Image (cartoon, helix red, strand yellow):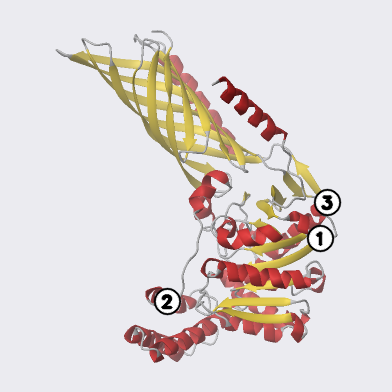
Amino acid sequence: MSVNLKLIFLCIFYIISNISVFGQKEDTQNKSQLGIHYFGELGLRPGIEIDYSYYFFQKKKVFDKKYIIQRLAVAPSFASYFYTKQSSNYLVASKLQYQFCTGSNKKFRYSYAQPYLKLGYLRSFYSVPVIEIQADGNFEEKKWRGTNSLVLGSGIDIGGYINKKYDWLFGFEYFVERTEDQLYLHRFVGKLGIQLKLNS
Amino acid sequence: MRYLAIYIILMIFAVSCMSDSLFSDQARQDYRLIIEGAEIPIVIEGNTNSKIFFILLHGGPGGTAQEFNAGSKPFTDVLESQIAMVYYDQRNAGMARGEWNEENLTIERHIQDLDIIIDFITTTYGEDIAVFLGGHSWGGYLGTSYILNKNRQSKIKSWININGNTNRNLRNFHNMEQMQLVAEEQINENINITRWQDLLNLIDNELDKNISTYDAETEKAVNSIIANANNLIDQDGLTTFNTSSSTYSIYTDIYDPFLILVNDRKGSLIEQMYAYDTIIDDSLSNVNLPVLSIYGKYDFITAAPQGTYLIDNIATPENDKKQLILQTSGHSSMLNQPKILADELLEWISFYK
């Protein structure tokens, strides 16, 4: 990994941790969710994503029949997905997400849209034998070889009420990989999963 | 439901116990070979039991071997049933990754990479295998450059040039010559006369410039005429395409359209090819291994006279060199006449194995 990449990686984690600390000072309700999602790069390249959303800001408006809640959250996330005959990919990221939630005052149902920005680090490990030619002309197998990338992306989730403990979530995400070999790779992800309401 | 669960568990267990043997009628092995910072993907697929390995160099420069493996199944499936196909993406092209170093983007470096890949295959599969080298378009230029050296010739059984570019400067004149030939044929047949005549006029104008040595900039005028000619070929229905869906390969193989799309934007070898022409010209007489050269009649990107130039200038005995013209093919013979091309290759390989 290049020195620049390491520095940027460290900065990402510094920002993530600090935002979370500041968030804890806010007086908010229903503060966190754990999400588990199918993470399909280009739809069908299989993967899984786990994220933890911490809502550090919330504003609620109540009308006659419905209410509207707007919330901001930081969501550290981890995703793992696979390219057939090529690589296993591990993405550590942080999302800054805005949630627009609307629900009925009479029924306990609600739904929301949740756009977000994402910044992260991606490590890919080759899942095939990696061989390197040596100075003497012999070939030697190398372990744990792969590529590093910085990731910047955005997406939108649509979610809603299932029961007191869970929400459903469906989403679409785009991110760009800035790789060590100076490529910008475009990635499109479809997501489907559930959100576990931790303190409901 | 219980039986279904047991079945799924057994299937997972069976799949996890499967191991890829090096030698089988339907082998598939994937490697990443690290050479001078480049991480080159190599796919070996097909009948490795045959102990015949056919390395097919992709075009470009900057293309991908997945254009054969993923996009030309009607062609490669026929070959893979009989022999082992070796697909690799050249450095900074296709699915290749690794350090980006512009100093390594040279024809010489590509030749050395190919040489190492051949060594890797013989080291992995044994000295008793027969290696055939083939190349399409720019792959034809790379392969022709590779065989100029006697030591390197000794590592392969034969060189198979498919719609290959064998001399960058002459290519411009050869393409115009072939376009004139086809244009006159079409005019004589009273087909699309006006447009073919317009094309002839464009070629005359280009020839009137009296350019004897083209370069990466001046060849753009010829390339523009070629684009016109290819449109006319499509309009007149002179070639047909027999492709396979590469969408399927996105999910079941290593095909990654986004990586392939951006990878070839780094640097270019075109100008170097013009400089390298002299080396090819001076060294073709060193070549005495069997050579098969195949072109599409309607290939205006690397026209058939490129093959004639190769065949006429090598020292291979007459009986061991051959030029074949596919009558309803353009530049993509693998897509235009996949079965005929594959059968011709298998016949040649079978004779020289």
Q: Secondary structure at mark 1?
A: loop
* Residue designated by label 2: B233
Residue mark closest to the camera, 3 vs 1: 1
Chain to which the residue tagged by mark 3 belongs:
A
**Residues tagged 3 and 2 counted as in contact (Cβ below 8 A):** no
Q: Amino acid at mark 2?
A: Ile
* Residue A170 in view in this figure: yes
Q: Secondary structure at mark 2?
A: helix
Residue at 70% in and 60% down: B82
Give the class, few, some or many, for how many residues have Cα within 10 Å of label 1's Cα (few <14, many ≥20).
some
Outermost left residue: A64
Residue at 48% in and 90% down: B210
Locate the C terminus of chain A and report the quarter of the image it occupies. top left
Q: CA distance from mark 3 to mark 1?
A: 19 Å
Q: Nearer the viewer, residue B243 or B201?
A: B243
Looking at marks 1 and 2 on the same chain, the residue that comes earlier in the sequence is marked by 1
Return the mark for residue B129: 1
Locate the N terminus of chain A and report the quarter of the image it occupies. top right
Using the rendered view, name the quadrant where residue A158 is placed. Answer: top left
Q: Secondary structure at mark 3?
A: loop
Return the mark for residue B244: none
Residue B332 % position (x, y):
53, 69
Residue A187 % position (x, y):
47, 42
Give the class, few, some or many, for how many residues have Cα within 10 Å of label 3's Cα (few <14, many ≥20).
few
Q: Nearer the viewer, residue B192 or B116?
A: B192
Chain to which the residue tagged by mark 2 belongs:
B
Q: Nearer the viewer, residue A84 or B117?
A: A84
Q: Is residue B333 above or below residue B39?
A: below
Image position of B154 (left or right of A154): right
* Residue B63 in view in this figure: no
* Residue designated by label 3: A138
Residue A179 % position (x, y):
55, 44
